[in-house]
Image (cartoon, helix red, strand yellow):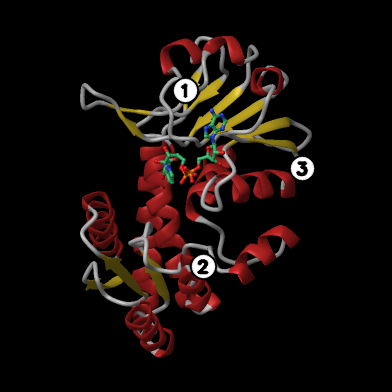
Amino acid sequence: MTIIDGKKLSNEIIDSLTNECIELKKIGITPGLAVILVGNNPASATYVNMKEKACKRVGINSFKYHLNEDSTQKELLDLIDRLNKDDKVNGILVQLPLPSHFNTDEVLEFISYKKDVDGFHPYNVGLLSLGLEGFKPCTPYGVMKLLKAYEINPEGMNACVIGRSNIVGKPMSMLLLNSGATVTTCHSKTKNLKEITLQSDLIVVGVGKPNLLTADMVKDGAVVIDVGINRIESGKLVGDADFDGVSKKASFITPVPGGVGPMTIAMLLSNCVEGAKK
Ligand code: NAD
């Protein structure tokens, strides 16, 4: 059994992006990422700070905008409009979730698809489902990079994705389908989850429930990618898979932390540098 090291691969990607940024600067280009935080969600503030730090590390200019909790949809759209037109900004990211009075779909659609480094704009979602080049959502894109780095080719595999969110599950299923896997997407209404996982060569779980995937649900030699991030009572961070049990069955498994998480930020930076190059 191999533990997939997302921290190591993300560091390699970040080093190579740092070199790309040095080269881009020589021709007068500095990639720029605008990050918009609305309100006072502490987890969102932490994510935004992590993204800012990561940008600094590779040499991407980061522009942070913090709107009050009670700011309006129009104020947010006006800011996005300015950033859409700003040549110093290649990527625009609105940290989700937004406070409940916002129309998130309208906000995401308002970001220029050319600066949509999160890959959430309907245009980029369309490109992804057509199997065409466009910005890909960072977490599933990071999973594909991990699989490639460990020479795990999904072609011909029975793959099961647990979770169908627009951020993780759906784009994950699409990327695996595009790479030749036979994909089953499971979710909260799925009745025979264990039956499906037991037939799967590759399982990607992104639900947000500790111990959702247990050893008895995994066939010998399966590849298990755990996207879940859960903080349990002891304060420890765990994924959705029972790591100790599942790792006895799996051929490859990602740990939490240190698996998919670090890849998400690396792919965000990668999308931003790609945007600047275009
Ligand atoms: P979400 O709440 O939007 O979606 C959860 C999905 O799980 C839903 O589609 C739901 O149908 C499904 N689900 C719920 N209960 C289920 C059950 N019992 N059986 C099967 N499916 C079930 O969450 P999300 O934004 O997709 O995030 C999922 C998890 O991934 C969370 O733990 C989140 O913290 C984590 N996450 C990690 C990263 C990363 O970088 N590693 C990035 C994004 C999200």
Q: Residues within 10 Å of mark 1 (few under 14, many from 20)?
A: many
Residue at horizontal 50 percent and vertical 36 percent from the top: 206
Mark 3 vs mark 1, foreground winner is 1
Residue topped by disc 1: 241
SS at mark 2? Answer: helix
Is 68 placed above or below 155 here? below
Task: Give the residue drawn at x 28%, y 66%.
Answer: 37
Q: Which residue is mark 3?
A: 180
Residues under labels 2 and 1: Cα distance? Answer: 31 Å
Alpha carbon distance from label 2 to label 3: 30 Å
Whichever of labels 2 and 3 marks the residue nearer the N terminus, that label is 2
The image quarter in which residue 255 lies: top left
| Type of amino acid under label 1 | Ala
Task: Give the residue at x 61% y 16%.
Answer: 218
How far is the residue under mark 3 from the one under mark 1? 25 Å
Question: Tag 3: Cα neighbours inside 10 Å, few (<14), some, or many (≥20)?
Answer: some
The residue closer to the viewer here, 47 or 37, is 37
Snapshot quadrant of residue 62: bottom left
Residue 24, placed above or below residue 140: below
User: Which residue corresponds to the image point at 53% horizontal and 42% vertical from the top-left?
Assistant: 143
**Residue type (three-letter) at the residue carrying disc 2:** Asp
Q: Is residue 235 visible?
A: yes
Q: Is residue 22 left or right of residue 123?
A: left
Mark 1 element type: loop
Local secondary structure at mark 3: loop
Identify the residue under disc 2.
105
> What residue type is disc 3 on?
Gly
Mark 2, Cα crowd under 10 Å, few <14 / some 14-19 / many 20+, is few
Q: Is residue 146 left or right of residue 14?
A: right
Marks 2, 3: nearer the viewer? 2
